Image: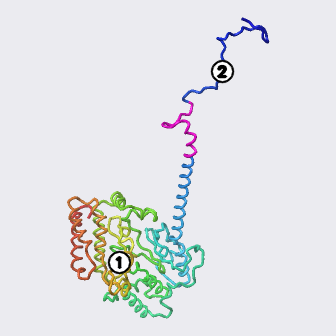
Amino acid sequence: MWWQGQGGLRPKPSCSSLVLAAPQRPLELPGALLPQPLPGREPGNREGRLPGLRVKYVFLLWLGIFVGSWLVYVHYSTYAELCRGHVCQVVICDQYRKGIISGSICQDLCNLHKVEWRACLSSVPGWQVYSGLWQGKEVTIKCGIEEGLNSKARSDAAPRQELVLFDKPTRGTSIKEFREMTLSFLKANLGDLPSLPALVGRVLLMADFNKDSRVSLAEAKSVWALLQRNEFLLLLSLQEDHASRLLGSCGDLYVTEGVPHGSWHGAALPPLLRPLLPSALHTALQQWLGPAWPWRAKIAIGLLEFVEELFHGAYGTFYMCETTLANVGYTAKYDFKMADLQQVAPEAAVRRFLRGRHCEHSADCTYGRDCRAPCDKLMRQCKGDLIQPNLAKVCELLRDYLLPGAPADLREELGKQLRTCTTLSGLASQVEAHHSLVLSHLKTLLWKKISNTKYS
């Protein structure tokens, strides 16, 4: 059928052919180009979860930046406080140019600038330690900073006009008076020993820095200031086999041989992270990064010989008051070298500290870090004998140093002897016979294992 509409005749659709006109469909993309829902998630939840993920990532990024910035700030603040070698050099050179002090390296340090300061190794602000270079040799530079000096002093700042450290001896002091003054000081610190006059002679010989056969006031002031430094006193008193050799000085600044290799590999970590190092990880580091076991045995023999020297030294008995692997060093040939003598103290100084000291517990009778004496609860005073002698503390250290990786045929006997050694006490009745016997057995056991090999 046809019907009349606008534009002419058109066929009239039947009812069966009438359909609703479908709306225009959008352009369909291939399925591969459409965003796919994450596995296990409904498409409808994706848009709701994305903002939460973004917030989480932003928070973690912010936290990382905050922690990183804090660590950088702490490291910088610690470095700025601990490392003040420029202040030390300014003070020393100022006193030298005024003629107050003297020394064998003053000219190179202050005028010719031939002493090169390198890495800072200081652990406390008042005692500056740097690696350096002098006369083509790797050296260690050590210098004390008086508490009165401003830690923020610039390199061009004027230091104090007078330092208490260089106030003795005074003008007009004769060489005889200075000799008696030095002898009295050594008696107070090392004890009244028959060998002290010979040590005084060494001090006066060292005081003649320019080798003109006389000691000037500046030279006397400098060597007197050096004697106030505990490590310098020990360098004079102990043999050079197990301590770094003294190379020169200026005022109370002195230079020794280069820093020995360290046995504690946790020292490479930042100071804030060192206490967090688990003992198991420390042992693993020791085995992975440390020397082979035979070399460790050789270093241990040197350490035991050092303990023997402290007990039978020419200038009295000395105590190790901070027994840690951080103080155990060695040379390129694996000969033992004490890395730091600051915590080695003369027996006379320890006894003077303990004498008549009031206490409630044995912890109140502690000199340094681990030189501890018993407390007399009745008298409430510290006793004179230390609870743990040098040898017992060193053997405790050697258990962790030697037993891991030890040869199977040696491990049981070595462990037994080290256990016996750690039970030694500091009572005077045990010192002579028992200690010497245990030390001799340990040295013999280790030496037999490495003798007649490349490690000996």
User: What amino acid is found at the position of numbered circle 1 in the picture?
Assistant: Cys
Give the Cα separation between the discs numbered 2 and 1. 97 Å
Q: Residue at x 36, y 79 (%)?
A: 361
Residue 243 % position (x, y): 36, 74
Based on the picture, tell me whether residue 37 belongs to the magenta stretch.
Answer: yes
Residue 49 % position (x, y): 55, 43
Residue 35 % position (x, y): 56, 34
Based on the picture, tell me whether residue 318 belongs to the magenta stretch.
Answer: no
What number is the disc on residue 371? 1
Mark positioned earlier in the residue sequence (2 or 1)? 2
The quadrant where residue 321 appears: bottom left
Q: Nearer the viewer, residue 48 or 159?
A: 48
Q: Residue at x 42, y 83 (%)?
A: 227
The residue wearing badge 2 is 22
Q: Residue at x 47, y 75 (%)?
A: 127
Q: Which residues are magenta?
A: 33-53
